[in-house]
Image: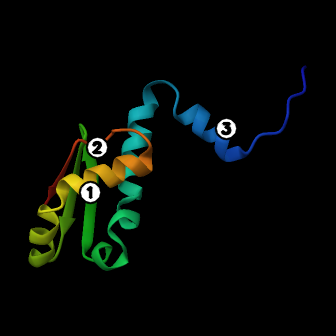
């Protein structure tokens, strides 16, 4: 068996998970996971559910005022999430 240089386990996991048909699912989950990083802890504490379905990030908030405020920044949210994910996986953000 040929010896190779050691690799980080995170690199190996990314290589396996991001190859093939799991790629979209993994990137969508990563987009959901990054929501708190994009909006910060203040907004995230009002978030009680989020998921991605066919490129649309659905976010459920418990504050009506916050829903209204974030609806004005949907395009910026999409841009920031896709930048952190590294690919244009989210096409739209729906605030519920």
User: Which badge, 3 or 1, is on the more N-terminal residue?
Assistant: 3
| Dot label at residue 12 | 3
Residue 48 locus on image (x, y percent): 26, 69
Residue name at image x 43 percent, y 47 percent: 85
Q: Secondary structure at mark 2?
A: loop
Indicate which label's residue lies in the foreground, 2 or 1: 1
Residue 53 locus on image (x, y percent): 24, 42
Q: Give 43 or 53, whichever is nearer the viewer.
A: 43
Residue name at image x 83 percent, y 39 percent: 6
Q: Is residue 16 left or right of residue 65?
A: right
**Spatial separation of the CA atoms under disc 3 and disc 1:** 29 Å
Quick one: label 1, few (<14), some, or many (20+) residues within 10 Å?
Answer: many
Q: Which residue is mark 1?
A: 77
Quarter location, residue 17: top right
Residue 96 visible: no
User: Which badge, 3 or 2, is on the more N-terminal residue?
Assistant: 3
């Amino acid at each position: 068996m040929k010896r190779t240089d050691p690799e980080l386990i995170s690199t190996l996991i990314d290589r396996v998970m991001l190859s093939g048909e799991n790629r979209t699912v993994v990137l969508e989950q990563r987009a959901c996971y990054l929501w708190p990083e994009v909006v910060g802890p203040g907004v995230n504490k009002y978030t009680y559910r989020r998921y991605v379905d066919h490129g649309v990030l659905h976010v459920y908030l418990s504050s009506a005022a916050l829903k209204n405020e974030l609806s004005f920044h949907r395009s910026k949210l999409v841009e920031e999430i896709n930048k952190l994910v590294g690919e244009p996986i989210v096409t739209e953000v729906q605030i519920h």
